[in-house]
Image (tube, rainbow, N blue to C red):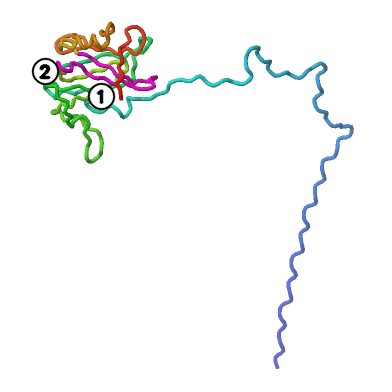
Amino acid sequence: MTAPIPGPAPVPGPAPVPGPASAPGPASVPGSASVPGPASVPGSASVPGPASVPGVASTPGPTPSQTVGPFYGYALPFPGGGEVAPSGDATAITVHGYVYDGAGEPVPDALLEFWQAAPDGSLVPRPGSWRRDPASGAFLARDGLDFTGFGRVPTGADGHWTLRTLPPPPTAPYLSICLFARGLSGHLFTRAYVEGLGGERELKGLAGDRAETLLARREGAGVFRFDVRLQGEGETVFLSFDR
């Protein structure tokens, strides 16, 4: 009879490793003392705040106002705004000038709108001043054929503007002008009577001794000069209309 074989004896586990002993804190140095804070300087005094200035209010006043905008040169001008006369018309005239402020300085961001009758005296409006691309909606140039009697021209950096149009009729020998500029609480209306078209009598009755400020003077063949002065010496006559 076979005797049972005993199993292997159990292997004892490893003995636990003792943890590190806590390190003792640094020993105090014999004779050392705590460091005191900085001592106050004898005779020193606290620094007082800024003294108030006599005659000046302690509460600040409002910030002075200034003009910022409006900026008429953005979005309002359109391509060909100053090309009122049809392309190639031999009777076309050029009217140009400057816009000056009260100090005699040019106004670089003014906008002028013009209305006038056709040479035959008609006031029938025709499309053609503003055309839009049917696909993008962007402004297109004038069609170059129809006389609409309307123009819109911005001034350049030197305050200069130029309009190419047809001569107004003797029955209404002027260009109606609406002026927009920075610093104005509203737009201004005036007229430019084209020299040599017979409007002198009407001009004199409208503006009296200041009639010269409404006259577009001939500079050459088909070229006329008309400056607008907002204030000061030689101020342009501006008109008001009943509504």
Give the residue at the far right of this rendering: 31
| Screen quadrant of the C terminus | top left
- In the image, residue 95 sits, relative to residue 11, either above or below, namely above
Residue 137: image x %, image y %?
A: 25, 38
Who's the residue at 72% across and 89% down the image? 3
Crowd band around label 2 with a 10 angstrom C-alpha radius: few (<14), some (14–19), many (20+): few
Q: Earlier in the sequence, mark 2 or mark 1?
A: 2
Residue 133 or 226: which is nearer the viewer? 226
- Point out the image quarter for the N terminus: bottom right
Q: Quadrant of residue 204?
A: top left
Mark 1 is surrounded, within 10 Å at the Cα level, by few (under 14), some (14 to 19) or many (20 or more) other residues, namely many
Left or right? Give the position of 23 relative to 151. right
Report the span colored magenta: 170-193
Residue in front for this viewpoint, 154 or 228: 228
Question: Quadrant of the rendered structure where residue 213 is?
Answer: top left
Could you give the CA–CA distance between mark 2 and mark 1, rounded to whole angstroms? 21 Å
Q: Nearer the viewer, residue 229 or 33?
A: 229
Q: Indicate left or right for 50 with 153 as reference.
A: right
> Which residue position holds label 2?
91
- Seen as rendered, the residue at the extreme bottom is 1
- Amino acid type, callout 2: Thr
Residue 3's disc number: none
Is 168 a magenta residue? no
Foreground residue among 41 and 106: 106
Please, what is the three-letter code of the amino acid marked with disc 1? Arg
The verdict on residue 186 being magenta is yes
Mark linked to residue 152: 1
